[in-house]
Amino acid sequence: ALQRITRGAEIIALQDKPVCTLDKVWPAELCRVTGYGAALNVVKLTKDSTVAIWGLGAVGLGVAMGAKERGCKTIIGIDINPSKFSKAEEFGCTECLNPNSLQLPLVQHLTEMTDGGLDFTFECIGNVGTMRAALESCHKGWGESVILGVAGPGQEISTRPFQLVTGRVWRGCAFGGWKSVDQVPQLVELYLKGTIKLDEFITHRLPIDKINDAFTLMQCGTCIRTVVNF
């Protein structure tokens, strides 16, 4: 490690110049670019697409940002915490829903408001119940549902086979479909140029002696990302 000349695999080689400091590059971490990439790389969104996003944390906001970039006409954010709605609208959601405030079951409500179902849905929570709801809110014949949330160990997803044989697609996504070696540097460049939002995910900044407050914010769902300085 201390030699000036050595040999190694090409994949671990870095260019011999500083690209970006850590305080600038860290916002391009997994959650944010996963959602953003899911909207850009994993499915084919168009300006006429109707989209719904379950969970308005960092992953869900990334999806909203990508869907907005694609020009989608309808981007519905879904969360049981209404305090997240204003931030979701900043990132591109055209409207937000709290399932607990609806008169109808969520799937029925979405199906009726979109004339048969959504073109694309994204589950960004990791709850097997919302994974099923996201699939069953898709339009028969062409609707696609993407699972981004990570469920607990041993949990299983289920739905009626009819939901799939009628043309819906259920798929997963890892790291937003980005190829890390080639495309992460491109994401950093886009961030530095101001093309994509990343700093806007940060809702709190705290000193190291307030780290317990940071965990409380996370557990209560009152933050998107908190930076702890030490």
Image (cartoon, rainbow, N blue to C red):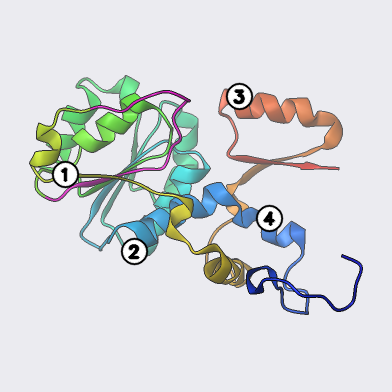
Distance CA(mark 1)–CA(mark 2): 22 Å
Q: Is residue 196 above or below residue 105?
A: below
Q: Is residue 186 above or below residue 132?
A: below
The residue to which callout 2 is attached is 70
| Label 1 with label 4: CB-CB less than 8 Å | no
Question: Looking at the picture, which amino acid does disc 3 mark?
Answer: Gln
Q: Earlier in the sequence, mark 1 or mark 4?
A: 4
Question: Looking at the picture, which amino acid does disc 2 mark?
Answer: Arg
Q: Earlier in the sequence, mark 2 or mark 3?
A: 2
Q: Earlier in the sequence, mark 3 or mark 1?
A: 1
- Could you tell me residue 173's position as x and y percent? 39, 49
Q: Earlier in the sequence, mark 4 or mark 2?
A: 4
- Count neighbours of disc 1 (C-alpha within 10 A) and say few if under 14, some if 14 to 19, many if 20 or more: many
The magenta region covers 142-158
Residue 43 as seen in the image, left or right of residue 221: left
Q: Which of the pair 200/37 is nearer the observer?
A: 37
SS for callout 4: helix
The residue to which callout 1 is attached is 168
Residue at the location (46% across, 47% down)? 61
Distance CA(mark 4)–CA(mark 2): 25 Å
